[in-house]
Image (cartoon, helix red, strand yellow):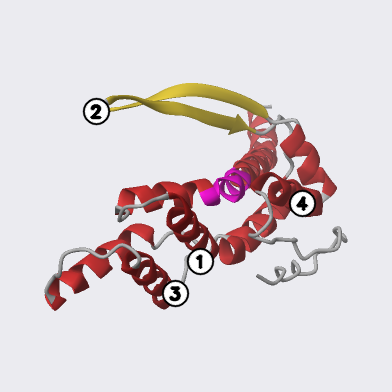
Amino acid sequence: MSNLHPFPTSPTPSPALPLPFDPAMAPGLRGRMLREALPEPLQRLLDHGRVGRHSRFTEDGFADVVEDWTPPDGVTPRQAMQARRALAEIDETILAPAPANHLLGRILALLSHFPAKATTPEVEQLLAMDWADDLGEFPAWAIDQAARRWRRTRKWRPSIAEIRALCEEACAEERGLAERLRAIAVAGERTGEAAGGTGAARPMLASALRRMR
């Protein structure tokens, strides 16, 4: 996959991009390269965020341990803008959902390696729609990796849930970074809103005090 497009020009120069990305690289290395390509203020925020963990339960009982990440205090509106730009790049390119034709072609090819009982054309169409609906959120490269991993490590026909789990694992690093950038953006935007509200209230307070004199 080719590198991503550079960010739009901003009033204050940012480090040169595009963001580097190669899905064939190990997830940890991919994640480190993406972080290092971000503006330095974002890198510092990512390094100093707070990590919390709690157990997640479903109707069947304990499911797993969920990680919560909170940005450090003092995120500025400018840092929020930088985070939004980086997030848009990741969401619109690296994590962009696979085209329907690619998704269905990859899944049909995978299932062809594991023949099943014959089904009617109507049922086959419904099955294809189910796969497209349940995997449609994932990028093409994550679906490709999941299919490749299943072909090489399993001897039976996959279920949708099993391929979904592999897709989630494939892009976990990039999704995690996107979520942290989103948290930074929200924190900085709240800071800007609070500052704006305070600034607007001051003239009203001053006017009220003058009327009281």
Residues at discs 4 and 2 in contact (Cβ within 8 Å): no
- Of 117 and 130, which appears nearest the observer? 117
> What kind of element bears circle 4?
helix
- The magenta stretch is 170-179
The amino acid type of the residue labelled 2 equals Glu
Identify the amino acid type marked 1: Ala
Which amino acid lies under the numbered mark 3 shown in the image of this protein?
His
Residue at image mark 1:
140
| Residue carrying label 2 | 59
**Element marked by disc 3:** helix
188 w.r.t. 72: above or below: below
Does the magenta portion include 178? Answer: yes
Q: Is 120 displayed left or right of 100 in the figure?
A: left
Q: Residue 123 carries which label?
A: none
Tell which of 147 and 113 is nearer to you.
113
Secondary structure, mark 1, is helix
Point 74% across, 66% down: residue: 7
Spatial distance from mark 3 to mark 2, Cα to Cα?
Answer: 35 Å
Mark in the foreground, 3 or 2: 3
User: Badge 2 local density, few (<14 within 10 Å), some, or many (20+)?
Assistant: few
Residue found 47% across the figure and 65% down from its top: 97
The reply to whether the C-beta atoms of the residues labelled 3 and 2 are less than 8 Å apart is: no
Question: Sequence order check: which comes first, mark 4 or mark 2?
Answer: 4
Q: How far apart are marks 2 and 1 (CA)?
A: 32 Å
Q: Do the residues labelled 2 and 1 touch (CB within 8 Å)?
A: no
The location of residue 128, given as percent across then percent down, is 26, 69
Q: Which mark is residue 102?
A: 3
Residue picked out by circle 4: 33
Image quadrant holding the C terminus, namely top right
- Decide: few, some or many residues near mark 3? Use Cα within 10 Å; few <14, some 14-19, many ≥20: few
Q: Which amino acid does label 4 sit on?
A: Met
Is 135 covered by the magenta stretch?
Answer: no
